[in-house]
Image: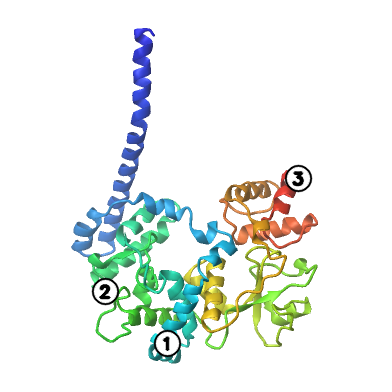
Amino acid sequence: MSLLLKRFSRLFLASLTALPLLANANENNDFIQCTDRLKVQAISAGFSDYIVKDVIPTLSPLKRVIDLDQRQPEFSQSFADYLKLRLTNYHIQTGRKKLTEHKVLFEKLSKQYGIPAQYLVAFWGLETNFGRHKGKMSVLNSLVTLACDQRRSEYFTSELFDLFHLIDNKTVTVKQLEGSWAGAMGHMQFMPSALRKYAIDGDNDGIVDVWQSEADALTSAANYLNSIGWLEKERWGRQVKLPENFAFNKVEFDRFYTLATFKALGVTRANGTDLSDYKIDAELVLPAGANGPAFLVYPNFNIIMKWNLSENYALSVGLLANRIQGAAGLKVSDKNNDNNNLYKSAELQALQEKLNIMGYDVGKPDGIWGPKSRKAIRLYQLQHGLVGDGFPNREVLIKAEINS
C-alpha cells in the first residue's frame, strides 16, 4: 500500500471514530442552549434564585427517557398483550385486599367526591402496582430532557415549570423528586400540573406527600377525577357482542350515539341478552378490530382517557375495576383471535403513507394507530368492500398494497 493511501486510510478511520464524538458534542450544545432558554424563561416567570441558580444549572439529559418515549406500551403492544400484563390475578386479588384495608377511607372518598372505590384501586394497581413501583428516575432530569426534545417540548416545558412552582412553594423538595421516565410521581403517578392543581392532604398531617402517604395519593386522585367531570352514578362501559355483518357504515368511531341506536343495530350484551333501555350515550370501541372483543363505552370512559390518553389503558382500568368488584372476566369467542390482527409499526406507517397519497388524511405517518388513522382506514375499507372496523389488519394491508 502506498504511503499516500495509508495516510488517507488513517484519516478516513479517524473521521469515522470522531463522528460519535461530534454528534455527542452537538447534542450537548443543544441541551446547554435549551437550559439557557429555560433559565431566561424562569427569570421572566418570577421563579426564585434557588430555581434559576441552583436547580436549572444541575439538570442533565437522560437518553433513556427519549428511548422510552418512543416505545410506550400503550401504543406498541396489542390489546391482548397489554391486558395480559395488567389484568392479572395478582392485580385482582391485591385490589380486593386494598378495598378492605382502606374501607373507611374509600367510603369517605366515595361520599365526598363520588368516585367508587374500585376505580381508585384500579388506577392505583395499573399506575404503580399498588405503590410497589413508583419509579426511581430523576423527575427533574426526565422533564428537562423531554422539554428540550422537539416532539412535545411545549407540553413538557409547562410541566417542568409547574414542578418549579411546587418546589418554590415547598409542596415538594428536590430530594424526593423520583418518578417515571415521563415525570409522573407517587402512588398514583401525578404529573406536576395535576399535583399542583388537585393534591390534597388526605391524612391531615399538614403535608401533601403522594410518595409516602397512601391517603394523600388516593384522596388527590379522587379530587382529580371529580374535578374533571366523573359522573357518580354511571359506569365506564361494558363488553358487548356485535351481530354478524354489523353495519359499520352506520357508526363512526370516536363518536357517541344513543344506546338505543346500538340496540337497533343488533348490538347485545356480551352474553347475548338485550341492551337496556337506559338513556345514555355510548361509543363503540374495538381495540383489536372486528375480530377482537367489542365494547360500548360511556362518558366516564373519556374521563379515564384524560388520565392517560390511551384506549388500551382506559379499557384496562374499567375491566380491572369490574374484576376487583367481583365481575367475571372478558367473554372470548372463536373469532376473538388477536394473533390474526397483529401488525408491525413499520407496516402501519407504510399504510399511513399510502393512505395519505390516496387522499385519506391520517396526518403525519408515525406507525401509531390513533383516531385519524382509525377514521381514514374505516373510510378506505368501506369504499373497497372490506369490513369497516378501522383496524389495520392483514386484509387491509394487503389490499392497500395491491391498490398502491
Which mark, by number, is residue 301?
none
Amino acid type of the residue that numbered disc 1 sits on in the rendered structure: Thr
Residue 303 position (above or below residue 338)? below
Amino acid type of the residue that numbered disc 2 sits on in the rendered structure: Thr
Q: Nearer the viewer, mark 1 or mark 2?
A: 1
CA separation in Å, label 3 and label 1: 58 Å
Percent position of residue 27, x then y: 34, 42
The residue singled out by tag 1 in the image is 100
- Taking the spot 62% from the left edge, 48% from the top edge, the residue there is 347
The residue singled out by tag 2 in the image is 171
Which of the two labelled residues, at mark 3 and mark 1, occupies the earlier sequence position? 1
Provide the secondary structure element on which disc 3 rests. Answer: helix
Q: Residue furthest top?
A: 2
Which mark, by number, is residue 403?
3
**Quarter location, residue 331:** bottom right
**Quarter location, residue 154:** bottom left
Binning the other alpha carbons within 10 Å of mark 1 as few (below 14), some (14 to 19) or many (20 upward) gives: few
